[in-house]
């Protein structure tokens, strides 16, 4: 407790060094918070596309119930395929009517015979798409028009998912690189500031050692001081990131519409932020401990006779 | 209390101390005198085991300091109150905090701190300076604060290395009076100095060092009926 008080007193009596250390660490953890959220959101986006029915196979009008059941069973057993659903002509009509509910006339102009029955399913991995589609197309009750459920411009969903995966991957890679650079930067700033503090206190440290202070007694206030910098930096960076996120979430949700990239309930949302904070505190502790140990070892080596 | 038994200390080929032998009993007031480089400070640094002797043995309270393990050295040092020529007060700490650090080093319970601090600051006459920083104190006050810091943990031995070296005569006299007062309370005091006039003024045992050897030792001091230390000259 005495060492903690002593370290807080040191911060109060040398405020500019403290502000320099804390602001660099805050910036690092602010960027880390934002990147963690971006990575989480991109994962959610990829998952959103991956869990949608990706393939739709239209069935021949003369397909019997037995044939349809056999095909469904065969697809369900395939380890590359998940979420197999049969959509009858009537259900297809109902979906159409729901989608055109703002213009009832469109719905009245069509009958169930206008829509073919279909089997929809998702793929475990989009890589399997071409093979699976080709195999399903060989089935005698399947129409030739087997393909992805939607297209965006000239791109098919498989391309979109792959692109999102690429974006997610490169976001992670660039995030790790950026955070590493900032973490190294913070570490060096901490090293310089703590080293400077120890050098300024060299006489005091020498006197303490002569007067019977144990190595831990000499080191503890410096280590506590570094931990204070780290913890305050992590919390303020996280707080700033959280405020930015809370401020931007409604606009992002409105812009993305159906894509749910943030947890919808507040418990999950704040749990995510809690996990990020815990991770950042752990990282701050590691940076602080490592920085203060190295700074102390370097400076005390010069003090030893 | 302190015994040097045929101690020799070499720094490379330089002989700092050679065949130094003396015994200091509890309650004595001892001056180590001699010119610069005579080995006075080396005696202190050997006693607190900052240096190891090249030959001989050193005993403190009956225990050889040479046989101490590394982890026991802080305890030895905290049992000796050290006072330095340049005070070595912690500049960023107030007088009170300087004393508190020593109490924490010694592991004294916190509920005793206030009483101890008040007692020693009253003894050295700095009760009204408790919240001042060293930079706000005069030279004499700084040295008295340093003595208070050495005293606050209640060591039986105070080793003052040139405590009056940076002080004018009047202030130096004040510091010596203080050390005498502390000696009268039963503490053993060792003072290194090259201030001959001070040694003549204040009675005590005088060990003269020259070129790392004991040139003379006036003999053990003993208490007079009035409690004042008197010199028992060696024949």
Image (cartoon, helix red, strand yellow):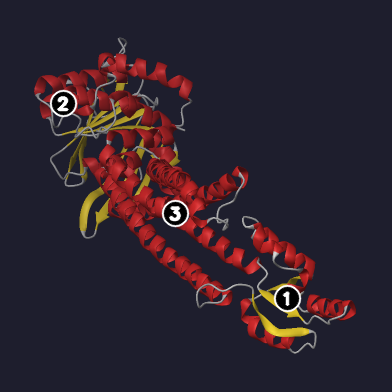
Residue A162 on image: x %, y %:
54, 75
Q: Nearer the viewer, residue B16 or A219?
A: A219
Q: Looking at the image, is mark 1 or mark 2 nearer the viewer?
A: 1
Q: CA distance from mark 2 to mark 3?
A: 56 Å
Q: Nearer the viewer, residue B144 or A286?
A: A286
The correct choice, above or below, for A301 with respect to B139 in the image is below
Q: CA distance from mark 1 to mark 3?
A: 35 Å
The correct choice, above or below, for A180 with respect to B232 in the image is below
Q: Is residue A278 among what the camera can see?
A: yes
Residue placed under numbered mark 2 in the picture: B139
Discs 1, 3: same chain: yes
Q: Residue at the spot x=34%, y=37% of the render? A: A211
**Is A48 on the left-hand or right-hand side of A175?**
right
- What is the secondary structure assignment of the residue under circle 3? helix
Based on the displayed image, in which of its 4 quarters is residue B216 positioned? top left
Q: Residue at the spot x=26%, y=28% of the render? A: B146
């Amino acid at each position: 407790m005495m060492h903690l008080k002593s370290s807080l007193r040191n911060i109060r009596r040398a405020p500019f060094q403290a502000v320099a250390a804390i602001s660099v660490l805050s910036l690092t953890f602010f960027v880390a918070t934002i990147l963690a959220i971006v990575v989480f959101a991109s994962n959610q986006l990829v998952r959103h596309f991956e869990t949608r029915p990706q393939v739709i196979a239209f069935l021949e009008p003369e397909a019997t119930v037995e044939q349809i059941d056999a095909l469904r069973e065969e697809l369900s057993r395939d380890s590359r395929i998940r979420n197999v659903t049969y959509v009858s002509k009537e259900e297809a009509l109902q979906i159409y009517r729901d989608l055109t509910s703002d213009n009832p006339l469109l719905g009245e102009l069509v009958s169930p015979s206008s829509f073919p029955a279909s089997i929809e399913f998702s793929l475990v991995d989009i890589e399997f798409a071409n093979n699976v589609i080709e195999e399903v197309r060989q089935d005698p009750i399947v129409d030739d028009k087997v393909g992805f459920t939607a297209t965006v411009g000239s791109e098919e969903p498989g391309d979109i998912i792959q692109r999102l995966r690429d974006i997610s991957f490169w976001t992670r890679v660039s995030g790790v690189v950026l955070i590493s650079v900032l973490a190294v930067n913070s570490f060096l700033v901490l090293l310089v500031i703590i080293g400077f503090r120890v050098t300024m206190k060299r006489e005091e440290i020498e006197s303490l050692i002569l007067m019977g202070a144990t190595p831990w007694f000499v080191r503890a206030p410096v280590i506590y001081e570094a931990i204070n910098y780290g913890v305050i930096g992590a919390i303020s960076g996280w707080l700033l990131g959280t405020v930015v996120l809370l401020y931007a979430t409604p606009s992002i949700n409105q812009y993305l519409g159906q894509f749910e990239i943030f947890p919808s309930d507040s418990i999950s949302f704040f749990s995510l932020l809690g996990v990020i904070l815990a991770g950042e505190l752990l990282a701050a502790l590691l940076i602080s401990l490592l920085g203060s140990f190295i700074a102390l070892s370097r400076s005390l080596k010069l003090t030893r006779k | 209390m302190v015994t040097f038994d045929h101690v020799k200390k070499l720094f490379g080929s330089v002989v700092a101390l050679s065949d130094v032998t003396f015994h200091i009993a509890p309650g004595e007031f001892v001056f180590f005198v001699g010119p610069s480089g005579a080995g006075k400070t080396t005696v202190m640094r050997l006693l607190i085991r900052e240096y190891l002797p090249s030959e001989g043995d050193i005993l403190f309270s009956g225990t050889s300091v040479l046989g101490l393990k590394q982890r026991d050295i802080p305890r030895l040092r905290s049992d000796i109150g050290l006072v330095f020529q340049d005070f070595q007060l912690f500049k960023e700490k107030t007088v009170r905090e300087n004393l508190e650090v020593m109490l924490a080093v010694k592991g004294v319970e916190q509920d005793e701190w206030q009483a101890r601090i008040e007692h020693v600051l009253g003894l050295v006459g700095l009760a009204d300076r408790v919240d001042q920083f060293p930079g706000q104190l005069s030279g004499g006050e700084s040295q008295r604060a340093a003595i208070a810091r050495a005293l606050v943990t209640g060591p039986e031995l105070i080793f003052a290395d040139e405590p009056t070296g940076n002080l004018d005569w009047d202030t130096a006299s004040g510091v010596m009076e203080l050390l005498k007062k502390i000696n009268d309370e039963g503490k053993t005091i060792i003072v290194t100095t090259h201030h001959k006039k001070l040694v003549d003024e204040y009675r005590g045992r005088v060990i003269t060092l020259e070129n790392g050897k004991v040139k003379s030792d006036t003999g053990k001091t003993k208490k007079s009926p009035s409690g004042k230390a008197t010199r028992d000259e060696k024949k």
